[in-house]
Amino acid sequence: MTGDEPLVLGIETSCDETGVGIVRGTTLLADAIASSVDAHARFGGVVPEVASRAHLEAMVPTVHRALETAGVRLSDLDAIAVTSGPGLVGALLVGVAAAKSYALALDVPLYGVNHLAAHVAVDVLEHGPIPEPCIAMLVSGGHSSLLLVDDVTRALQPLGQTIDDAAGEAFDKVARLLGLGFPGGPVVDRLARDGDAAAIAFPRAKPKGTYDVSFSGLKTAVARWVEAHEGEVPVADVCASFQEAVVDVLTSKALEACRDTGVEHLLIGGGVAANSRLRALAQERCDAAGVRLRVPRPGLCTDNGAMVAALGSRLVAAGVPASAMDLPADSSMPVTEVVNR
Amino acid sequence: MALVDSGGQAVAECVVVDARRHGELLAQGIAAVLGDAGVDRRDLGAVVVGLGPGPFTGLRVGIVTAATLGDALCIPAYGICSLDGLGAGERVAMTDARRREIYWARYDTDGTRVSGPHVSKPGDVIEQLRGVPVVGFGAQVHAEALVGLDVRPEPKYPSAPALVERAVALLGSVPEPLVPMYLRRPDAEQPGPPKRVTA
Ligand SMILES: [Zn+2]
């Protein structure tokens, strides 16, 4: 090992971002991203084959951009970490194959890690050691999960998840029916700032006795409202009222989990964690409940390689055994498994 | 996968025919081949990879593995049309493209590819391929649709040593980018307007 702390390269290809991050210990040195989001826009959602093709093209150039930014060479690396699941299997396979090949050629350990655990671990780069235990709420276009994190290097305990659409998916679908394009999250967030969140009372599904959430009914309610509306649709009000319903449901369940478990820390990650209203309401409710809130900066919330490198670095430091060379890509990797072996 | 020495002799080879497990098995196979041959990975002089056509997922695993191996070891990675590694001399090399189609290429007497790679329905090419030996498992899969062609039982699959043999002429040159021969566009439909939820 060169230097005091391990130098870890992380590769993320579970969806439409080719991410390569480099971390030394808990210090972020580089976070290079190549996104294929524009190629998916006209399809209104991520097309797996299009994403996989883009990952292959971007892989080596993105690795080199990260190395350049970090000012290190491949031969300086102490370990390679890669998202081995969950995600789109064809997309995951590109990253996993690249990671194996680098690990083999450089003769360093390989860690196939859980994407959700990496979303939690990334905050070490911004706010220092992850408070453990903590409740983690991970919200994106592909996942909406509430987790209890005792030790991010060992296991995460699932508390609840969406029973239908992911939170980010709901943003995409509502944006589509308002003709706002793909992805929907950023544009809805922006338009909602000029709207009245109390203008329309959209339903909030907060079933008792479970931390599961549901956004399918909300999406349908928005569609019904828009169809029934006569005259010009007040897009800003619809965005604001819809967004308010989503972030109300999410933060309610997260705080409920904190209260029930007696855990005093809430960590939010995933692409939807970049939503300004979610951040504001979560802060408000955490302050009121005496819960400490941690949300990484937006660039670290969305899928990236830094989060994978950050988790890899924690695993090396914790002495967790590495993955084998026959590491699979597991599209439905359970969150109870942090490292795939 | 195969390890070939400077004389063009295969010194170790590992073949697994399992289209669904490329991702899991390839790196392990490379490690095994190096181990069997007693060769240190740092002594490799070049990597050669089949660019397809073939199933997209497996193709990408092979290509990204070759690209990153070359990158990490600072050696060139050369891509060869996978059909070039199937048989020798005058022939048609054919692999199964699924969806009732074949991937194929035609070679003249000195083994030069003169047509392809293509993706076609067997019935559309049968006339132009009469009289030429046809090799590859694709021809056997689609035997019923290829009646009247000179289909040979062997060889069945592109071989790694054969790909290396084709690449020998390239050694020392600057490699071309490793671009997969997909031959098909991604399956993706552009959505229509959102469906109404109220009647
Ligand atoms: Zn994610």
Image (cartoon, rainbow, N blue to C red):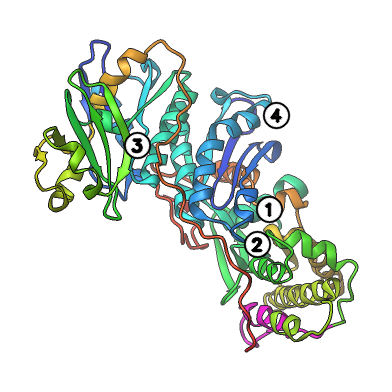
Q: Which mark is residue A43?
A: none
* Residue B77 placement (x, y as % from top left): 42, 23
Q: Residue at x 26, y 21 (%)?
A: B112
In the image, are marks 2 and 4 on the same chain? yes
Is the CB atom of the residue marked by disc 2 within 8 angstroms of ligand 1's nearest atom?
Answer: yes
Is residue A39 in view from this perspective?
yes
* Residue A118 placement (x, y as % from top left): 60, 52
* Residue A110 placement (x, y as % from top left): 47, 39
Q: Foreground: B193 or A100?
A: B193
Q: Are marks 2 and 1 in contact (CB under 8 Å)?
A: yes
Q: Which mark is residue A140?
A: 2
Q: Are marks 2 and 4 in contact (CB under 8 Å)?
A: no
Residue A319 located within the stretch drawn in magenta: no
Q: Amino acid at mark 1?
A: Thr
* Element type where label 4 sits in the image: helix
User: Which contiguous range is marked in magenta?
Assistant: A200-222
* Residue B45 placement (x, y as % from top left): 37, 15
Q: What's the CA distance linking mark 4 and mark 1?
A: 20 Å
Q: Are marks 4 and 1 in contact (CB under 8 Å)?
A: no
Residue B10 appears in which quarter of the rendering?
top left
Q: Residues within 10 Å of mark 3 (few under 14, many from 20)?
A: many
Q: Which residue is mark 4?
A: A69
Q: Amino acid at mark 3?
A: Gly
Judge depth for marks 3 and 1 and give the one in front. Answer: 3
Q: Which quadrant, please, contains the N terminus of chain B? A: top left
Residue A107 appears in which quarter of the rendering?
top left
Instruction: Say which chain tag 4 marks.
Output: A
Q: Which residue is mark 3?
A: B52
Q: Residue at x 63, y 28 (%)?
A: A67
Q: What's the CA distance linking mark 3 and mark 1?
A: 34 Å
